[in-house]
Amino acid sequence: MTSPRIAPYGAWKSPLTTDLIVSETIGLGQVQLDGPDLYWIEMRPAEQGRLVLVRRSRDGQVSDVTPAPFNVRSRVHEYGGRSYLAVDGTVYFSHFDDQRLYRLDPATVARPITPALAYRYADPVMDTRRRRLICVREDHTQEGQEPVNTIVAVDVNGSDGGQVLASGSDFFAAPRVSPDGSQLCWLSWNHPNMPWDGTELWVSEFRPDGKLTGARRIAGGPSESIFQPAWSPDGVLYFVSDRTGWWNLYRWLEGHIEPLCPMEAEFGLPQWSLGASTYALESPEYIICAYAQHGEWHLARLHTTTGEREVFDLPYTWVGAPLVDWQKQIYFLAGSPLSHQALIQLDRARREYQVICRASSVSVPAGYLSIPEAIDFPTENGLKAHAFFYRPANQDFAASTKEKPPLLVISHGGPTSAAGNVLDLEIQYWTSRGFAVLDVNYGGSSGYGRAYRQRLNEQWGIVDVDDCVNAALYVARQGWVDSRRLAIRGSSAGGYTTLAALAFRQVFQAGASHFGVSDLEGLARDTHKFESRYLDRLIGPYPAQRDIYLARSPLYAAD
């Protein structure tokens, strides 16, 4: 073994090239079970980003279900989400190009079952008793008007676009049919709320003609966010609520709401896309659940009556979308600082796990990987914020002891999203060249409770910028980086934070905004329905507070 070569930070040669990072990499998501068959969606950059439905059958064979040019992707709420359903070998899916629902039976060709109109469909479930799909529909047929969202029933053999079951709210999500087919639950919310601000959980009974009657709100409101309602095998309704300030698990039983396991932990997620999940009902007595604490995710088995929690010992720092099959095998997505995101199968009885599919086949020796350190740092108003700090790491190089590394601060998008600590080769690209990287979960990020998310209310462009600035100054004061060489980068909402930090602060020497927002007024005037009132909370009502929009827009402070 040779000694590391001495070279300036930032000038180290690295095997992590841009070509390597983008090669043999896919996206994984939307995992579902259909009896013994396991399905998931793969986003394939090599096919121009086409989303392909993949199945692993009971004999272990893996194959594509949807051939080109089908692209299994919905645009409901613009970001889509749960875009297919597999039932007894038949698949129903949304095709991106025309947003129609298609039916694909085994050994046949997919055919549309909804009309060629400006409708979008997502989050489908099967109403077995009535042989129909129930899903969210977004109606774009009225040009020049805001799209209309409803919950509709679609005949599995084809229909006129769907029979409306629930309407009247600006947004709908998560329609779920009870096991005996007698009830339907769903989520709804209205402008200016986003789903992480306030949603309502509704339950209604089916009439003999398939319509709904007796709809009643059982939880939620303008200041309570409900996430992922689900029926247990014995007909009990479970859901996640942040009524205590944390997204925790609850159930609705005999007209009463009961907490399952009160914790200062997040069992929920911001619903940027439909169908997101953090738990699955194994049986009436047990739930397999994922939850976040201090920026790290865990997988556990929770007793529904006693609240006893058994945490699985796994080498992952992020887990999500758990499922349980009829043999009590657990499936979930996971990742760690040393491993790419992957689809995992866990044998609960044997405590053995295996990787079914990886998001990347790129293998990087550990000597070129930087392991993130979770840090808390002081910020404005006597508060603390959170970040993941990556030190430079390259087994072939070292720097002079008289030198400190340059720092790249990353501001994540959303802004109601979060930075995680899963292997990210775009970060390792920099650390393996001698840069330190600081991935900041500024105030407004998810994963740290409702109060932390609400720090950004009316403060976008202030709190996020302050936290990125204070994070950089904190690690500089610790002596970990060179305070004269600080840079910042962000995409979308993170690009706005980047531009605002460069325009309104004198801390960073360089920055890169990737498709970022420079003009808040332009964003308020021209965006899709889902986010059309998002800025009401992040900044203030527009145009009533136009002066604030202009004052916080980097476009007008380029000098």
Image (cartoon, helix red, strand yellow):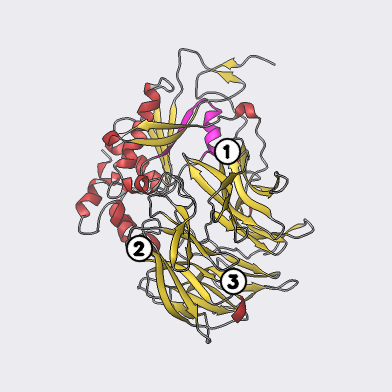
Q: Quadrant of residue 479?
A: top left
Where are the magenta residues, as a range?
421-441
Q: What amino acid type should be assigned to the residue bearing mark 2? A: Gly
Q: Is residue 174 left or right of residue 357?
A: left
Marking on residue 423: 1
Q: Secondary structure at mark 3?
A: loop
Q: Answer yes or no: is residue 148 visible.
A: no
Residue 429 in the magenta stretch? The answer is yes
- Asked whether 437 or 17 is in front, the reply is 437
| Mark 3 vs mark 1: in front | 3
Task: Identify which residue is drawn at 49% across, 13% down.
Answer: 401
Query: Where 250 falls versus 93 (above or below)?
Result: above
Residue 121 in the magenta stretch? The answer is no
Query: Where 400 falls versus 64 (above or below)?
Result: above
**Proximity of marks 3 and 1: CB atoms separated by less than 8 Å:** no
- Asked whether 264 or 276 is in front, the reply is 264
Task: Identify which residue is drawn at 25% across, 41% down.
Answer: 557
Marking on residue 179: 3
Marking on residue 85: none
Name the quadrant of the C terminus: top left
Location of residue 323 in the rendering, given as x and y in whole percent from the top left corner: 62, 56
Task: Identify which residue is drawn at 31% across, 47% down.
Answer: 460
Label tally = 3
Location of residue 40 in the rendering, given as x and y in whole percent from the top left corner: 64, 58
Considering only order in the chain, which callout, 2 or 3, is on the residue closer to the N terminus?
A: 3
